[in-house]
Image (cartoon, rainbow, N blue to C red):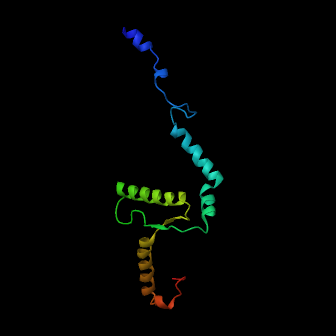
Amino acid sequence: MPESDQTQRDYRDTVFLPKTDFPMKAGLPQKEPKLLARWQEENLYRQLREERQGREKFILHDGPPYANGDMHIGHALNRILKDMVVRSQTLLGKDAPFVPGWDCHGLPIEWKVEEQYRKKKKDKKAVPAAEF
C-alpha cells in the first residue's frame, strides 16, 4: 500500500469500544478547582460526618506531622495511606472521622510552662489541669 493510502485509512470502525460521554482528556487542572469549590459549597465532609453518626466507629488517630526532623517523601506516603484507610472505612459505612494528632508537640510547650512555674516557685500540682 502506498504511504499516502495508509495515512488516509480510518481505523475507528475496526476497534470496538463502547460509546461514552466522557471526554478524551480529563482536563484535571481546570476541573479540580471547580470540584473543590463544589464540595466546599455543599459542605460535603460535614454531610458525610452527619450521615455516619451512630454507626460503628473507626478511629485512626494520625500522629503529628514531621515532628522528628525535616519533611521527606515518607511523611507524604504515611499521610496518603492513612487518608486512604479512613476514606475506605467511610465508604464502607462506618463513622470514620479524620483525627489529626498533635501529641508530641505539646510536650515541649508543657516543659516551657513548667520552667516558668519553677522560676515563680509555683507547684504545677496545685494548679487545676485546665489552667495548666
Residue 122 showing in the rendered view: no
Residue 25 showing in the rendered view: yes
Q: Which percent across, then down, holds residue 112?
A: 42, 78
Pick the residue in front: 69 or 31.
31
In the picture, measured across the screen, residue 62 lies left or right of residue 45, that is left
At x 55% / y 38%, what residue is drawn? 30
Q: Which percent across, then down, holds residue 113?
A: 45, 80
Pick the residue in front: 61 or 87.
87
In this rendering, the answer to whether 122 lies above or below 32 is below
At x 61% / y 69%, what residue is drawn? 54
Q: Which percent across, then down, holds residue 50?
A: 63, 63
**Residue extending furthest top?**
2
At x 58% / y 46%, what residue is drawn? 35
Pick the residue in front: 8 or 109.
8
Pick the residue in front: 4 or 27.
4
At x 44% / y 14%, what residue is drawn? 9
In this rendering, the answer to whether 99 lies above or below 16 is below
Q: How many marks?
A: 0
The quadrant of the rendering that contains the N terminus is top left
**Rendering quarter of residue 107:** bottom left
Q: Which percent across, then down, holds residue 71?
A: 37, 58
In this rendering, the answer to whether 7 lies above or below 79 is above
